[in-house]
Image: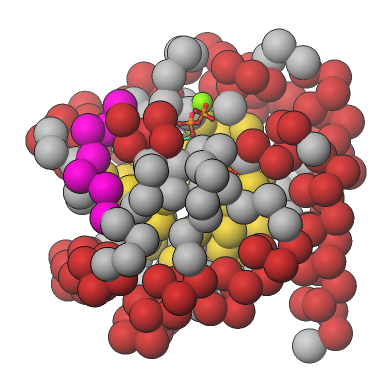
Amino acid sequence: MTAVDKVLLDNRGKNVFILLDPDKVLKEKDTYAKNLQRACSGIASVLVGGSTGFSQCEVNETIDLVRSVCNKPVIIFPGSPAHVTPKADAILFMSLLNSRKTKFIIEDQLEGSLLVWKYGLEALPTAYLIVGEGGTAGWIGDANPIPFEKPEILLMYVLAAKYLGFKYVYIEAGSGAKRHVPPEMVKAVKNVVGNDVFLIVGGGIRTIETAKSLLNAGADGIVLGTLFERDPDRAIEIINSITREKSMR
Ligand SMILES: CC(C)=CCC/C(C)=C/CC/C(C)=C/CC/C(C)=C/COP(=O)(O)OP(=O)(O)O
Ligand SMILES: O=P(O)(O)OC[C@@H](O)CO
Ligand SMILES: [Mg+2]
């Protein structure tokens, strides 16, 4: 087990990730710095990434901002190999398994592999799966999205990911999605794969009830992106509420 991997695995079922999109953060640096500082103690890690609109230089600037206010691990959530940087602690080294394009399944990974090796980055082997509307990532990644009412298809993908040796599975409804991943879908997967893979769930999570229902259904971690951008107070409320529950267990 490597360092970031251990932090996340030791906190299974309770990890909250904040997603920072360099394209947005760098336009309002002071506001993001202030809000991240408030959120920092309750989160597992900061994901830095996005589908479009920025270069490695902007990823670096965003990571510098994170480091100035928060001591949690920074994980790259790459939209492309151009986002790989030695400044991060780890990378979701992901393959979009339900893409129709080999680019997102293996070609971007080939390009990124040498950089990850050269920079000595911790790679978290991640199967990225798009469900529901899928957002920008689903569109750019040319996904064949798994319908919410077909948990059995999601299960097939998650089992395939497990048998291929992926340690992490990111179930993505799309940034800002109107509908988040249904907890029943997470439960159907967790019931079969247990702790063999680490389940990250993201997209459209906006309330404490949703956040808790996903963690209770078996998500090992949840991602807050759009809510942290638009309503940081509410995002911090969710984080604090999960932290309080954690300390009562
Ligand atoms: C492993 C390496 C080096 C690259 C992998 C590249 C892959 C597989 C990309 C999949 C397709 C893709 C574009 C994923 C982006 C995922 C992501 C960081 C989403 C964050 O949300 P945004 O899509 O930026 O949301 P907004 O639309 O709200 O900005
Ligand atoms: O922006 P939101 O809807 O929180 O989604 C977060 C993440 O899953 C997007 O990749
Ligand atoms: Mg983005």
Q: Which residue lies at the image location 78% right of the left edge and 48% below the top edge?
A: 235
Predominant SS of the magenta segment: loop
- Percent coordinates x, y for residue 160 in the rendering: 17, 68
Q: Is residue 202 above or below residue 183?
A: above
Q: Taking the image as drawn, is residue 162 in sight?
A: no
Q: Quadrant of the C terminus?
A: bottom right
Residue 150 located left or right of residue 75: left
- Percent coordinates x, y for residue 37 in the rendering: 86, 39
- Percent coordinates x, y for residue 71 in the rendering: 76, 45
Q: Is residue 57 magenta?
A: no
Q: Is residue 40 above or below residue 217?
A: above
Residue 64 located left or right of residue 238: left
Which of the pair 1/248 is nearer the observer?
248
Where, by quadrant of the figure, is residue 161 drawn? bottom left
Q: Which residue lies at the image location 55% right of the left edge and 22% below the top edge?
A: 59
- Percent coordinates x, y for residue 44 in the rendering: 67, 57
Where, by quadrant of the figure, is residue 137 drawn? top left
User: Magenta region: which residues?
Assistant: 140-146
Residue 1 located left or right of residue 47: left
Where, by quadrant of the figure, is residue 48 drawn? top right
- Judged from the image, the quadrant occupied by ligand 1 is top left
Which of the pair 180/201 is nearer the observer?
180
Q: Which residue lies at the image location 60% right of the left edge and 79% below the top edge?
A: 216
Give the mark count.
0
Which of the pair 185/106 is nearer the observer?
185
Residue 64 located left or right of residue 173: right
